[in-house]
Amino acid sequence: MAVSSVSSESSLLQAAETSAKTAANTNAAGTSGTSSSSTSASALSSLAQNYTTFLTLLTTQLKNQDPSSPMSTDTFTSELAQFAGVEQQVETNTKLSSLISLNEEGQMSSDMSMVGQTATATTSILPLQNGSASLNFTGSSGQTVAISVTNSAGTVVKDDLVTADSGTNTWTWDGKDSSGNQLSDGGYNVAVKTLSSSGTISDQAFTVRGTITGIKKTTSGLEAEMGSTSIPMSAINKVSNTSTGSSTTGS
């Protein structure tokens, strides 16, 4: 193999590793969030405290004002109107959150029928279930593709360089790291890069596959559980009982 080819493939793997590490940081950040109901409750509590303080100050000012120069009611009326407007908006948001929650519960009941089926999703989260994980990508014959997998901490655990077939390709991972150690099931992060004939490195579109084992509701919406990890329902684009496509298995 030519030196330039080796150099290009090395750069391709490095690019895939960098993207996988970035995906790990992005996915980790996506797990944190504050529920809308908690936010609304906090807003109402803060509003009540501010309103009580405002009335206390206003009452004190009225008691101690100069009778010969009484306070104008314009400011008082304006601030009361502002408080009333904010209170109404917070109440509206609270009711809207309740409606969304009810809708999600109904959708959750409907989505439970997908449990036990295989789902294809557009996400960088790679679910390792029963020591196996897979992803699909559409390639051209002879295309060089690099795949990198990291754990939740962003540490690269698996790299693979494959030559694609024309059409749909399936890359399967046996859950072992680069040293041959079997890793525990869970959510990993994956990136796929490709190298053009001119040597240009670019992202390779791909989808991951996994078996849905449950449906859960989170602060950010409904998620499909795949073993000990989960993927947003919005990322799932196909659910089926069978698998199709040619297979490209990682070494």
Image (spheres, grey):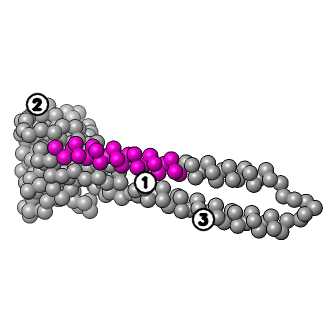
Whole-percent x and y of residue 126? 19, 51
Q: CA distance from mark 2 to mark 3?
A: 66 Å
Secondary structure under tag 1 reads helix
Q: Which residue occupies 54% across, 62% down?
A: 45
Amino acid type at image mark 1: Ser
Q: How many numbered tags mark residues here?
A: 3
Q: Main secondary structure of the magenta part?
A: helix
Tag 2 and tag 1, C-beta contact below 8 Å: no
User: Label 1 neighbourhood size at 10 Å, few (<14), some (14-19), many (20+)?
Assistant: some
- Precedes in sequence: disc 3 or disc 1: 1
Q: Nearer the viewer, residue 211 or 111?
A: 111
Q: Is residue 243 magenta?
A: no
Amino acid type at image mark 3: Gln
Whole-percent x and y of residue 7? 20, 47
Secondary structure under tag 3 reads helix
> Can see residue 156?
no
Q: Which residues are magenta?
A: 90-113
Q: Nearer the viewer, mark 2 or mark 3?
A: 3
Residue 189: mark in rendering: none
Whole-percent x and y of residue 41? 48, 59
Is residue 183 rendered to the left or right of residue 101? left
The residue where tag 3 is placed is 49
Tag 2 and tag 3, C-beta contact below 8 Å: no
The residue where tag 2 is placed is 166
